[in-house]
Image: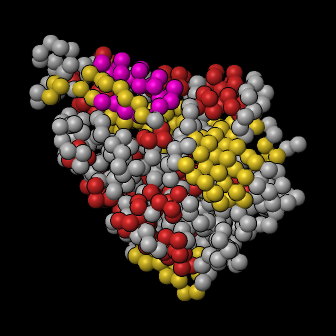
């Protein structure tokens, strides 16, 4: 069966070999700078990368992906497969076995009950779990003993590595979060700001949107790790300041997500204090089109649920917006060798991508002609086209950083040249990606016509990622504004293909389904793909053990970091 070979090739059978350290905490402090400041340490209540990664120092999944995208044991001794008996022959169950002797940072044992509780926590319909797509198809999680977890799916599930795998699905301690189920989830401040974990560090002090101070977990499973006694995780500023702080001044040891022009990064590296590091995985910079009506005259709740948008679902408008963008120029301006042009919502692995010719080349005159033919013209001479009397005026928002503002400026000019009026807005990344249900400025609420940001997925199989765009994943008041389908895209054909994907074992058929879903998301205007971007960070020349990983948390192996004398 092809599936068995595929699964065996996708997982590692043993844990990573540990690095050798003299003593836990012997290397003092390591200083990390994320210019997008974390706002919460519970990844289930935020889809923001900054929050996922800062939480990954504390909370851990059963397995995660290494730098090659290989599924690797983490809190278990091996990853279940059909070949080793951990995945049933009919593909309806997966059985995980926790490693023996694992402790929470408070000294109590990690058990299968904690894993089952985490499932109940994320799947509570009133909880607004940001990772709900990872549990699609699960009908039960059973715990026959303290170390065994049996996950049962409602249908054959060829890729059962959604639940409890990767940075988006770590294990929560049942005792700590027992009173945080459902609607109470967002109000559990102490738990969300200071979760008890099994990871190498413990959060001692968390100031949202500012700084986190961690100390080494005294009950971490390797007595020689971590090498650092303290982590200072500073948030805020901008990508340029972060890069300089590592590569020019040496004030910090690690700077994340240097979304800067290539020549700027090269100049910083000449400072001699640090080294840029890059990795490609599935990160896609894209524009999302709002499927609801963000009219400010509506109430905040109505702005995110009333359909349709006055003009953004018109096929001519969607196509014209895409045709007007010079994507190769965006790559050149923003990323250089760290980016490539793509037309696929799933930009990697390459087997899943699709080639859509009209997406690759700018055609301003063709875009104008398309709108003219659709009767979307400027009737009052003010330079702005109208559809059914509604002017094509858009509010285009994104997070604050130099590359994104360069993109906004270019795209605004192109869109206005074909007859739109474009207002630009940029929001502090800490707020935009913060997931605060009370804020009007989050990407989940999407109180704009257009928004732009990067998303990606853990590992090399895109099933759960594609599941994030089904109709039921749209953020709304009832989900406390959590949810992955921020554009509120809803398409019966797409949902049907996703349902088929979740029960299809044949690899070639899965590729076909993913490619069809890629085309739908593009042609029906859920998003406009811009750049398949590499992730670029920088680390101090005195910091050892860093292994850049874009398939999971960038800080996935921080327990192995150490100071070079």
Task: Give me the residue at 80% from left, 37% from top.
Answer: 541
Query: Where residue 123 sits in the image (x, y, percent)?
Result: 40, 68
Whether residue 513 is visible here, answered yes or no, is no
Whether residue 226 is visible here, answered yes or no, is yes
**Residue situated in front as seen by the camera: 363 or 146:** 146
* 28 displayed left or right of 446: right
Task: Give me the residue at 78% from left, 31% from top.
Answer: 273
Task: Give me the residue at 76% from left, 37% from top.
Answer: 540
- Classify residue 281 by image quadrant: top right
Task: Say which quadrant the N terminus sits in.
Answer: bottom right
**Residue situated in front as seen by the camera: 401 or 245:** 245
**Residue situated in front as seen by the camera: 28 or 486:** 28
- Classify residue 14 by image quadrant: bottom right
Query: Where residue 328 sits in the image (x, y, percent)?
Result: 49, 24
Asked whether 473 falls inside the magenta stretch, the response is: no
**Residue situated in front as seen by the camera: 508 or 520:** 520
Residue range corresponding to the magenta coloring = 395-416
Asked whether 408 falls inside the magenta stretch, the response is: yes
Is 446 above or below relative to 397?
A: below
* 270 displayed left or right of 118: right
Query: Where residue 379 sits in the image (x, y, percent)?
Result: 11, 17
Q: How many marks?
A: 0
The secondary structure making up most of the magenta span is helix
* 289 displayed left or right of 273: left
Task: Give me the residue at 36% from left, 40% from top.
Answer: 441
Task: Say which quadrant the C terminus sits in.
Answer: top right
* 490 displayed left or right of 79: left
Is 138 above or below relative to 216?
A: below
- Classify residue 122 by image quadrant: bottom left
């Amino acid at each position: 069966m092809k599936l068995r070979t595929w699964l065996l090739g996708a997982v590692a059978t043993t844990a990573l070999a540990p690095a050798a350290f003299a003593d836990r905490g012997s290397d003092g402090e390591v200083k990390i700078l994320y210019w997008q400041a974390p706002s919460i340490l519970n990844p289930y209540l935020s889809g923001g990368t900054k929050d996922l990664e800062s939480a990954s120092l504390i909370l851990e999944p059963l397995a995660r992906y290494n730098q090659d995208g290989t599924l690797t044991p983490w809190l278990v001794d091996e990853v279940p497969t059909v070949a080793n008996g951990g995945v049933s022959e009919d593909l309806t169950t997966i059985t995980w076995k926790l490693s023996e002797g694992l402790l929470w940072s408070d000294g109590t044992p990690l058990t299968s009950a904690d894993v089952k509780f985490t499932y109940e926590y994320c799947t509570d319909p009133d909880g607004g779990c940001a990772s709900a797509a990872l549990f699609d198809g699960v009908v039960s999680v059973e715990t026959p003993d303290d170390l065994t977890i049996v996950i049962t799916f409602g249908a054959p599930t060829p890729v059962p590595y959604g639940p409890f795998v990767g940075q988006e699905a770590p294990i929560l301690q049942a005792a700590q979060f027992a009173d945080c189920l459902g609607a109470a989830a967002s109000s559990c401040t102490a738990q969300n700001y200071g979760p008890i974990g099994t990871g190498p560090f413990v959060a001692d002090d968390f100031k949202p949107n500012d700084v986190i101070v961690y100390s080494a977990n005294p009950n971490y499973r390797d007595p020689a790790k971590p090498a650092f006694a303290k982590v200072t995780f500073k948030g805020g500023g901008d990508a340029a300041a972060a890069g300089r702080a590592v590569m020019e001044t040496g004030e910090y040891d690690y700077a994340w997500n240097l979304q800067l022009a290539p020549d700027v990064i090269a100049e910083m590296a000449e400072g001699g204090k640090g080294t840029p590091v890059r990795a490609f995985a599935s990160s896609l910079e894209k524009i999302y089109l709002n499927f609801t009506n963000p009219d400010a005259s509506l109430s905040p709740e109505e702005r995110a649920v009333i359909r349709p948008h006055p003009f953004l679902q018109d096929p001519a408008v969607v196509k014209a917006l895409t045709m007007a963008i010079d994507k190769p120029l965006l790559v050149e301006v923003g990323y250089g060798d760290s980016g490539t042009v793509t037309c696929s919502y799933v930009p990697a692995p390459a087997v899943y991508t699709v080639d859509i010719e009209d997406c690759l080349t700018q055609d301003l005159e063709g875009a104008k002609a398309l709108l003219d033919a659709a009767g979307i013209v400027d009737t009052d001479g003010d330079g702005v086209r109208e559809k059914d009397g509604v002017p094509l005026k858009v509010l285009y928002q994104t997070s604050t950083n130099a590359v994104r503002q360069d993109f906004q400026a270019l795209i605004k000019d192109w869109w206005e040249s074909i007859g739109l009026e474009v207002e630009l807005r940029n929001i502090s990344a800490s707020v935009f990606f913060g997931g605060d249900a009370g804020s009007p400025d989050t990407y989940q609420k999407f109180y704009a016509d257009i928004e732009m940001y990067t998303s990606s997925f853990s590992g090399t199989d895109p099933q759960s990622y594609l599941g994030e765009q089904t109709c039921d994943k749209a953020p709304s008041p009832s989900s406390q504004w959590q949810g992955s389908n921020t554009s509120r895209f809803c398409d019966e054909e797409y949902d049907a293909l996703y349902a088929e994907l979740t029960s299809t074992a044949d690899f070639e058929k899965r590729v076909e389904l993913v490619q069809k879903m890629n085309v739908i998301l593009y042609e029906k205007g859920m998003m406009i793909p811009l750049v398949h971007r590499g992730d670029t960070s920088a680390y101090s020349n005195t910091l050892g053990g860093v292994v850049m990983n874009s398939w999971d948390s960038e800080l996935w192996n921080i327990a192995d970091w150490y100071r070079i004398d």
